[in-house]
Image (spheres, rainbow, N blue to C red):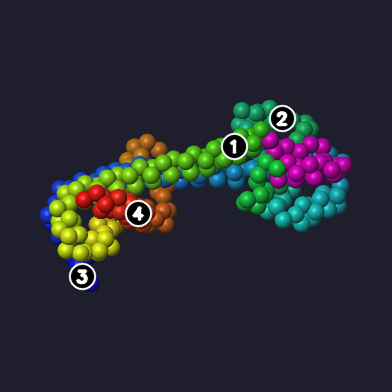
């Protein structure tokens, strides 16, 4: 019952340098994954922040009636994609322009007539801020005869979602590539351990030990090596994060779930890589 863990830790004691090097190799490979995860997470946060600013602004004619505006608000609120509709009066628009456009503050202070129109600012629900949805709602807003113009920055919205799609594809491709590199490194470390103990394995085969009995300590060793490498990678990633945060610019640490997933991934990769390596080399020794 205790043969597998006892044999695994005996192997660690017999070759501590090899074990340390294997864990360090795995840690450095997963460290690349950690750095990529840190960058991908902060890119996602930045894109989410930009996406929150996606809104539709319907500018109203000066002769728009109060009842007509209220009816349009109710109709827009009834749409499942709409989160908030805010009516901005002409005076509020002028105050907002003075606040947000200080370079035109003097020009807007001495105006005899307020040239800015009233508007309805339409905010969308998360998940509904796609180019197709935004364009469809903008077209619906244009149907009202008292709406003079509808703007939502179509080119900017298209570029935002192009960046999001590119980020998703890049994250998938690089994530898989780094995972494969980590698995190959773990498998290489296990193969080195198998070659170092090939005489012992040969004797065990000669006395009738089953492959599963021989394989278990190596699988356990791969799991521990992967866990140690994952922990090392998390530590190195956190040190890098603190350095960037303090000396370069503000970023966010990756979610705790990602940290746990990183260590678990190290264990899983360790077991899988060890399984393939042992299966191949048991036939060769």
Give the residue number, with chain letter if any, for mark 4: 272
First in residue order: circle 2 vs circle 1: 2
Q: Earlier in the sequence, mark 3 or mark 2?
A: 3
Residues packed near mark 4 inside 10 Å, few (<14), some (14 to 19) or many (20 plus): some
Q: Which mark is residue 53?
A: none
In whole angstroms, how far apart are the C-alphas of marks 4 and 1? 36 Å
Which residue carries the number 1 mark? 162
- Mark 3 or 2, closer to the camera: 3
Quadrant of the image occupied by residue 32? top left
Q: Along the polypeptide, which appears first: circle 2 or circle 4?
A: 2
Front disc: 3 or 1: 3
Label 2, label 1: how far apart the Cα atoms are: 43 Å
Front of the two marks 2 and 1: 1
Camera sees residue 89: no
Q: What residue does disc 2 label?
A: 110
Q: Alpha-carbon distance for marks 4 and 3? A: 22 Å
Badge 4 vs badge 3, beta-carbon distance below 8 Å = no
Distance from disc 3 to disc 2, alpha carbons, whole Å, reads 88 Å
Q: Are marks 3 and 1 in contact (CB under 8 Å)?
A: no
Q: CA distance from mark 3 to mark 1?
A: 55 Å
Residue 33 vs 104, above or below: the answer is: below
Closer-to-camera residue (256/151)? 256
Looking at the rendering, which quadrant does residue 212 occupy? bottom left
Q: Which residues are magenta?
A: 133-154
């Amino acid at each position: 019952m205790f043969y597998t863990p006892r044999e695994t830790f005996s192997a660690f004691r017999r070759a501590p340098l090899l074990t340390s090097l294997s864990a360090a190799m795995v840690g450095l490979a997963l460290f690349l994954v950690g750095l990529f995860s840190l960058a991908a997470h902060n890119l996602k946060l930045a894109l989410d922040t930009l996406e929150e600013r996606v809104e539709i602004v319907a500018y109203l004619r000066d002769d728009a009636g109060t009842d007509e505006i209220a009816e349009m608000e109710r109709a827009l609120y009834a749409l499942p994609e709409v989160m908030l509709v805010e009516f901005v009066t002409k005076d509020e628009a002028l105050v907002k322009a003075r606040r947000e456009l200080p370079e035109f503050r003097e020009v807007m202070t001495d105006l005899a007539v307020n040239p800015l129109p009233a508007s309805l600012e339409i905010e969308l629900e998360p998940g509904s801020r796609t180019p197709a949805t935004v364009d469809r709602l903008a077209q619906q807003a244009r149907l009202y005869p008292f709406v003079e113009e509808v703007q939502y920055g179509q080119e900017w919205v298209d570029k935002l979602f192009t960046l999001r799609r590119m980020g998703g594809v890049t994250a998938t491709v690089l994530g898989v590539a780094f995972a494969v590199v980590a698995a190959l490194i773990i498998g290489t470390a296990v193969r080195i351990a198998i070659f170092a103990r090939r005489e012992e394995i040969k004797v065990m085969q000669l006395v009738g030990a089953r492959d599963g009995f021989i394989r278990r300590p190596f699988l356990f060793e791969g799991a521990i090596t992967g866990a140690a490498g994952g922990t090392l990678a998390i530590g190195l990633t956190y040190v890098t994060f603190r350095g960037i945060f303090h000396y370069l610019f503000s970023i966010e640490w990756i979610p705790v779930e990602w940290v746990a997933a990183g260590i678990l991934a190290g264990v899983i990769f360790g077991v899988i890589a060890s399984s393939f390596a042992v299966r191949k080399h048991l036939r060769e020794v």
